[in-house]
Amino acid sequence: MPDRPHLLETAGERWSALLEAAERRVSAVESWHVSGRITRATGMVLEATGLRLAVGAACKIELASGGRHWADAEVVGFHGNTLYLMPQADISGLPPGARVVPIEPSVQSRLSLPRQRIDDPGPPPVLSRHLPVGAGLLGRVLDGAGRPLDDLGQLSDVQPASLGAQSINPLARAPVDKALDVGVRAINALLTVGRGQRMGLFAGSGVGKSVLLGMMARYTSAEVIVVALIGERGREVKEFIEHNLGPEGLRRAVVVAAPADVSPLLRLQASVYATRLAEHFRDQGRNVLLIMDSLTRYAMAQREIALAIGEPPATKGYPPSVFAKLPALVERAGNGAPVGDRPAGSITAFYTVLTEGDDQQDPIADSARAILDGHIVLSRSLAESGHYPAIDIEASISRVMAAIVPPEHISLVHRFKQMVSRYRRNQDLIAVGAYTVGNDPQIDEAIARYPQLEAFLQQGMNEHVNYDQAMAHLETLFHTPLNRNAGRNPPGMPK
């Protein structure tokens, strides 16, 4: 008769083998998951039934049977039990009744398809995607979904973060009381920008706005630059990175590009993603320069989505939701709130606003002007005359300038603008010789100084003029020394 320990060992081996076989059979069974079906495809919007998802939830659409090809999409609305989905990519070949599967927010490099099991629903859906943020993104070029567009390999030293952000109590924000050097003489001296200020760059097409943005990105004293290229032509994206931004600017920058040929949903997401990246670095106490080109393309993307789901148009075809989303995006920039001993970081933002036919009364331009802290207007007539940067100094203003520079500086700026204005108002009379010197001493002074004033406003693309150099030049124009330390907090001065 065999001994008892041997019998127990044999029985244990049999049970282990049975359990392993059962595990293999269970793992071979496809898990159940919640899914819906596409019932209608009209233009950019797809209709799906069989799912209960909140607006903003992410999902995947099966483009080929067997789960070989999927397209990312987002819930943008609903009517009864029907969901309205907006795909982020091309959906050519979409069959009737295609499967729709909800997914968890994740970093886009994740390859597996998350599934929501019936017996394990998991956490409630998060209404915002999670995309990569972190120091490892510096020097990289990404798309609106956080995927690399450059050839530098996979992302490293990053972590996923929600695109949503908690609003900062306006009373807790640090004040805008220190100037930011942007490396452009006319802006540093005449339209001084404060750290945490939100500025608009109003321009039509072909007046040099991309060159000006590239100069600011290369020469700014900000520690981190985040560039959002929204709705631009693909050729212009590469040109901006290689020629306007250059290797010098790219080293401390993150570029998020969503060209004109991507879906409006991805253009919208790219704008929010760039803002979220800037918030991440601001929360670390850094001074960030956010450049978004352009805010108008962001509004147009929202218009496309809103009209596609049936929202009624208002001014010039823009639905009301567009004018609600603009301040929601812009207000995320600005100064942060100090945390303990750590000083507050800042996001100084420049948003380009495209004016159709140089129309400053465009509804987006008018709305942006009301929610921004100042605006720089680029003039087509100046650009056509070879005057670069083509800043119309009379039509431009920095609303926080009086809080960050001394009164003597403000007086010189007013004097500068008055002389330019007097000369340009009488330019036709002067050109034809109808004005006689001696009739008006102020016009006489403007005529005498105008060549110097015009030269002051111009600057070469590869010319770097810091804040102190710009101020010294402004002083020499009027032979008036300024106490640059008399301002509340000029660049380089401690708070």
Image: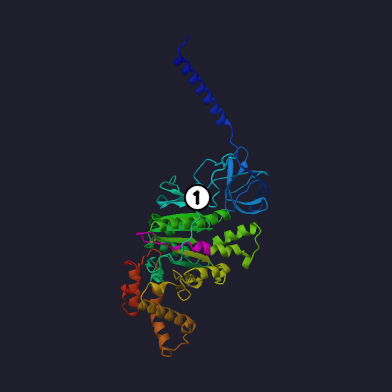
Direction from residue 34 to residue 217 in the image, left or right: left
Does the magenta run of residues contain 351? Answer: no
Q: Nearer the viewer, residue 103 or 5?
A: 5
Q: Is residue 357 above or below residue 292?
A: below
Which residue is outermost to the bottom?
439
Residue found 50% across the figure and 73% down from its top: 381
Report whether residue 54 is seen.
Answer: yes
Q: Nearer the viewer, residue 53 or 330?
A: 53
Report whether residue 205 is seen.
Answer: no
Crowding at dot 1, Cα within 10 Å, few <14 / some 14-19 / many 20+, comes out as many
Residue 224 location, x and y as percent?
Answer: 40, 58
Residue found 32% across the figure and 74% down from its top: 486
SS assignment at label 1: strand
Q: Is residue 40 above or below residue 178?
A: above
Q: Which residue is mark 1?
A: 130
Q: Is residue 41 above or below residue 332?
A: above
Q: Quadrant of the rendered structure where residue 335 is?
A: bottom left
Direction from residue 286 to residue 142 in the image, left or right: right
Q: Quadrant of the rendered structure where residue 305 is?
A: bottom right
Q: Main secondary structure of the magenta part?
A: loop
Residue 2 location, x and y as percent?
Answer: 47, 11
Residue found 41% across the figure and 79% down from its top: 414
Which residue is outermost to the top?
1
Amino acid type assigned to the residue bearing label 1 in the image: His
Residue 94 location, x and y as percent?
Answer: 64, 45
Range covered by the magenta-colored residues: 327-343
Does the magenta run of residues contain 342? Answer: yes
